[in-house]
Every structure is written in C-alpha cells, then in structure tokens.
C-alpha cells in the first residue's frame, strides 16, 4: 500500500466509522482540528489553509485511529463509498454561494471540512501535480449533490472532481465527475435555518438582539448573528 492510498483510507475510515453523519458537526471534528483548536471566535479570521495544516490534521487523524484500534476500510470500500474532489481556495471571491449551497460542506473560502482532507496539492504526493495549490479531499458519494450544488453557484470554477493521469486502478476509481448529479435548491423558508447552521459551523460571533437575514441572491447570502431560544435550538443540533 502506498502512502497516498493509506492517507485516503484513513480519511474514508474516519468519515465512515468515526464521524459518519454530516449534520453532527459537518465533518469538522475538533479532535483533529489543527488550525484553530477550540477557539471558535477566530475561525472567521484564519489564513488560507496551508500544506502544514493539512499534514498536521492527517497526523492527528492517523494517530487517533491507531490509538482507538479502528481498522482501516478496504481500497474497495473507499472507492465504492466516495470520490476525490478539489477546491482552489486562493481563487475564492468569498461570495458565500458555494458555502451556502453546499450546506456547509465547504466554507466561505471554498475550503472543504477538514475531516475530508487528503492532501494540499502536490506537497506530499506527486500524483496531484496537476493540482499544485488545491485542497484535495475524499467525500462520501452520499453528499456528491451538496458538493455539486456548491460548485454550480460558485462565481468561478474552483471546485470539481479530480481528473488524474494515473495507472493506479484505485486512484482512477476515485476520479471523474459522477453522473446523474442533482442541484439541491434551498427552499426560501429554510434559508434562515441554513444561515444559522453556517454561523455555528464557522464560529462567527454571536451577539444578542440581532437576527439572521438570507438574501434571495445566492452571491449576496448574508449571515448575521442571532440569540435567544432559536439559537439554543440550533446549538442542540451539534450535540
């Protein structure tokens, strides 16, 4: 098994066996968070994800899997249950459209949730030479439509499925855009709730006597802090 194959299996194992429900914490497990720790108040001020951050996250994930005695999924399972995607955060216009319509799978920089991170470009793996500044992630096929929805509303084409020139059968099985993708629109009555979820996912400051607004224009989706009973209800989703 190559180092890259093992890394992909570790990502797939973490998501399939440790943190399988997107809605639980949106694939943002605090125990492998190498960027901000538990200080949610600075999450909206972080620099673009770095190669070092991806490597450190991978180390923490691998160590926890080993300490907990969780066996890795097989190559066949990783290929059958997921695929590789890329995003280019340095090209983000920070419009929030992809974040909103991917329902939190990617953030405002179009950076995918860190549980999904495989690599930062070709920093560790030459197989990704075609994507030198991209964040490479493994995502379950069950949420392909969320990623696709975020991609469809992005102002620029900086999200997509990998297309690799490789003779590795395993890697080949993980690449290419899936067929029969469906754009998931968010009903008007759900936009406020989605804004609240994104606020909590990304640690945006919460202050009293403010409300959420969601503009009808995708690129102008506006999220403002909220407080009170509704906020407590949303917070319970993450327990």
Image (cartoon, rainbow, N blue to C red):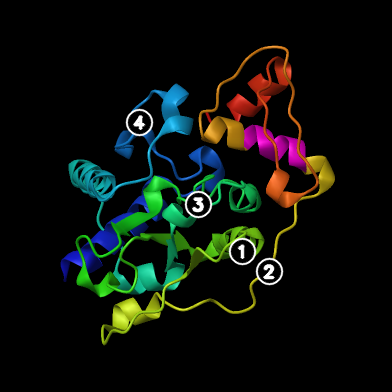
Image height of 151 relative to 105, above or below = below
Q: Foreground mark, 3 or 1?
A: 3
Local SS, label 2: loop
Image quadrant assignment for residue 152: bottom right
Local SS, label 4: loop
Label 3 Cα neighbours within 10 Å, binned few <14 / some 14-19 / many ≥20: many
Write down the region rendered in magenta.
Answer: 191-197
Label 3, on which residue?
Answer: 110
Where's residue 158, x and y in %?
50, 63
22 or 68: nearer the eye? 22
Among the two numbered marks 3 and 1 on one chain, the one whose residue lies closer to the N terminus: 3
Residue at coordinates 43% horizontally, 64% vertically from top-left? Answer: 86
Task: Tell me the quarter of the image containing the N terminus.
Answer: bottom left
Kindly check if marks 1 and 2 are in contact, taking CB atoms under 8 A apart as contact: yes
Residue 36: which disc?
4
67 or 205: nearer the eye? 205
Determine the CA span between mark 3 and mark 4. 17 Å
Magenta-colored stretch includes residue 72: no
Q: Foreground mark, 3 or 4?
A: 3
Label 1, on which residue?
Answer: 145
Image height of 109 relative to 149, above or below = above
Label 2 Cα neighbours within 10 Å, binned few <14 / some 14-19 / many ≥20: few
Determine the CA span between mark 4 and mark 1. 28 Å
Label 2, on which residue?
Answer: 182
């Amino acid at each position: 098994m190559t180092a890259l194959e093992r890394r992909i299996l570790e990502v797939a194992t973490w998501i399939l066996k440790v943190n399988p429900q997107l809605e639980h914490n949106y694939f943002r497990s605090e125990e492998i968070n190498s960027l901000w720790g538990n200080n949610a108040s600075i999450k909206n001020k972080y620099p673009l994800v770095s190669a070092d951050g991806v490597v450190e996250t991978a180390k923490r994930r691998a160590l926890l899997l080993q300490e907990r005695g969780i066996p890795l999924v097989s190559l066949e399972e990783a290929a059958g249950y997921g695929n590789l995607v890329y995003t280019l955060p340095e090209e983000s216009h920070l419009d929030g459209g992809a974040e909103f319509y991917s329902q939190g799978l990617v953030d405002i920089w179009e950076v995918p949730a860190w549980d999904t991170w495989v690599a930062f470009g070709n920093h560790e793996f030459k197989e990704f030479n075609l994507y030198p500044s991209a964040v490479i992630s493994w995502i379950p096929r069950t949420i392909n439509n969320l990623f696709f929805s975020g991609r469809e509303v992005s102002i620029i084409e900086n999200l997509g499925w990998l297309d690799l020139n490789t003779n590795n059968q395993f890697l080949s099985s993980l690449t290419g855009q899936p067929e029969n993708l469906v754009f998931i629109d968010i009903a008007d009555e759900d936009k406020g709730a989605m804004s609240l979820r994104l606020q909590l996912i990304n640690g945006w400051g919460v202050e009293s006597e403010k409300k959420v607004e969601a503009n009808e224009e995708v690129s102008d989706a506006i999220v403002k802090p909220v407080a009170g009973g509704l906020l407590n209800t949303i917070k319970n989703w993450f327990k």
